[in-house]
Image: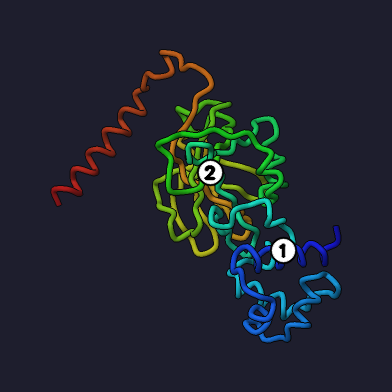
Amino acid sequence: MTLQTFLADNIRYLRMQKTQLSQEKIAEAIGITRDRYSKYENGKVSLPLEVLVALSKFYHLSTDLLLTVDLRKYRLEEMVNLPDNRILLPIKTDEMGENKIEIVPFKASMGYLMSYADPDYIESLQTMSLPFLRNGKYRAFPVEGDSMPPHKDGAYIIGRYIESLNDIKIGKTYIFLTHEGITYKRLSAVQPTALEVMADNSFYKPYNILLKDLLEVWEFTSSIAVEESQQNELLLDNTTIIKMFNEIKSDLSKLTS
């Protein structure tokens, strides 16, 4: 299927299913003749950029979406907009109406980096449902390493999609998708051009994620352990106890000041 045919199918589908308007009404809304619009919808001629933009504004859909996604496969009312004019993120539900949470495979997490904006790839991921996770778009990501205890290597973090960086909060933990890969860290500071993140394991030093390299942010909502914790792993060392005591002391001082 050519790009011209793909786009023609999309605008015909939108007109008939979303607006149920005539070709004449759509043409009038975007400032062209019915005859001219009909040729675009039938795929007889290429759609000029100015008409593409006009249709994008009319339907409140990104040009990227109109050009690259088969809209007949997805319910538009169950989608969440991605920033930077990227394609939409479908929210899938099961037979009971619960959100389907896509699971990013542990062994293929780098494949997600290459295909996170491809609806067909997202459609291929296995899913699960958790009844207490509602009102948002959720996805499960694998955790690697020992930087964020008690989450062990191989555990899964379920994150809620963050649509705007204005919604992130210092002190909370997030899954960050960058050009380098997927990382789970605690947000420690927000800078004009970067986010400072840190591990809960003090062995690792804080570092910056440049905003220009940031692709997606998912806020921690819950986790799934795939291995049982050992008893000695739950014991706190003296350094940790002293740190916790000092933090409590500091908080109490703020409350009484």
Q: Which mark is residue 194?
A: none
Q: Secondary structure at mark 1?
A: helix
Residue 101 location (% of width, % of height): 54, 38
Residue beneath the point at 51% across and 49% down: 161
Q: Badge 1: how crowded within 10 Å, few (<14), some, or many (20+)?
A: many
In space, the residues marked 2 and 1 are separated at their CA atoms by 33 Å
Give 131 or 72, whichever is nearer the viewer: 72
The x, y position of residue 93, in whole percent, is: 53, 42
| Mark 2 residue type | Ile
Q: Nearer the viewer, residue 130 or 27?
A: 27
Of labels 2 and 1, earlier in sequence is 1
Q: Quadrant of residue 63?
A: bottom right
In the picture provided, is 41 more to the left or to the right than 72?
Answer: right
Count neighbours of disc 2 (C-alpha within 10 A) and say few if under 14, some if 14 to 19, many if 20 or more: many
**In the drawing, what numbered circle is on residue 175?**
2
Up-down relation of residue 76 to residue 160 (above or below): below
Q: Residue at x 40, y 51 (%)?
A: 170
- Determine the secondary structure under disc 2: strand
- Name the image quarter holding residue 34: bottom right
Give me the disc on residue 10. Answer: 1
**Which circle, 2 or 1, is nearer the viewer?**
1
